[in-house]
Amino acid sequence: MADKTFTDQTFEDEVIKNEQPVLVDFWAPWCAPCRIVSPIIEELAKEYEGKLKVGKLNVDENPNSASRFGIMSIPSILIFKNGEPVKTMIGAQSRENFKKGIDEILAS
């Protein structure tokens, strides 16, 4: 489920060391495009349950993780595979676009 919350403290174990691909939604509560993207990410979390771990990281509360991956704009959606970010999608995008990015990574 996308209601999983990542923090600077849990990022290493939950994302980097995870054997399953992980989608991280870098966001902030004041960000209007983030609020637009959030329900789409929630839907995709349900659709890809068991294939992809999905969670959110509040960039205001967790600046170390955001800085580590060069997050300059939000929402930024990063997909990690084998501990490395392999796909970045920045800004509000269509469900189809996010789905295409996820499918691309799961197929590789």
Image (cartoon, helix red, strand yellow):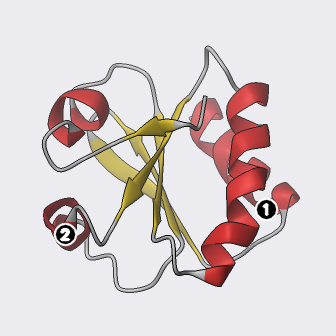
> What's the residue at 74%, 27% (across, down)?
46
Of the two numbered discs 2 and 1 on the same chain, state the one appearing first in sequence.
2
Q: As displayed, is residue 108 above or below residue 102?
A: above
> What's the residue at 76%, 53% (across, down)?
39
In this rendering, would 6 be left or right of 75? left
Residue 62 horizontal/vertical position (percent)? 22, 61
> What's the residue at 25%, 64% (across, down)?
61
10 Å neighbourhood of mark 2: few (<14), some, or many (≥20)?
some
Residue 82 horizontal/vertical position (percent)? 31, 32
Q: Specify the quadrant that holds the C terminus.
A: top right
In this rendering, would 92 be left or right of 25? right
Q: Which mark is residue 97?
A: 1
For badge 2, the amino acid type reads: Pro
Residue 13 horizontal/vertical position (percent)? 19, 28
Q: Specify the quadrant that holds the N terminus.
A: top right
Tell me the CA gap for discs 2 and 1. 27 Å
Query: From the viewer's perspective, is the residue at label 2 or at label 1 nearer?
Result: 2
Residue 59 horizontal/vertical position (percent)? 32, 68
Q: How many marks?
A: 2
- Most extreme residue toward the top is 50
Q: Secondary structure at mark 2?
A: helix
> What's the residue at 25%, 66% (across, down)?
69
Q: As displayed, is residue 86 above or below residue 3?
A: below
In this rendering, would 17 be left or right of 92? left
Q: As displayed, is residue 107 above or below residue 37?
A: above
Q: Are marks 2 and 1 in contact (CB under 8 Å)?
A: no
For badge 1, the amino acid type reads: Asn
Residue marked by disc 2: 63
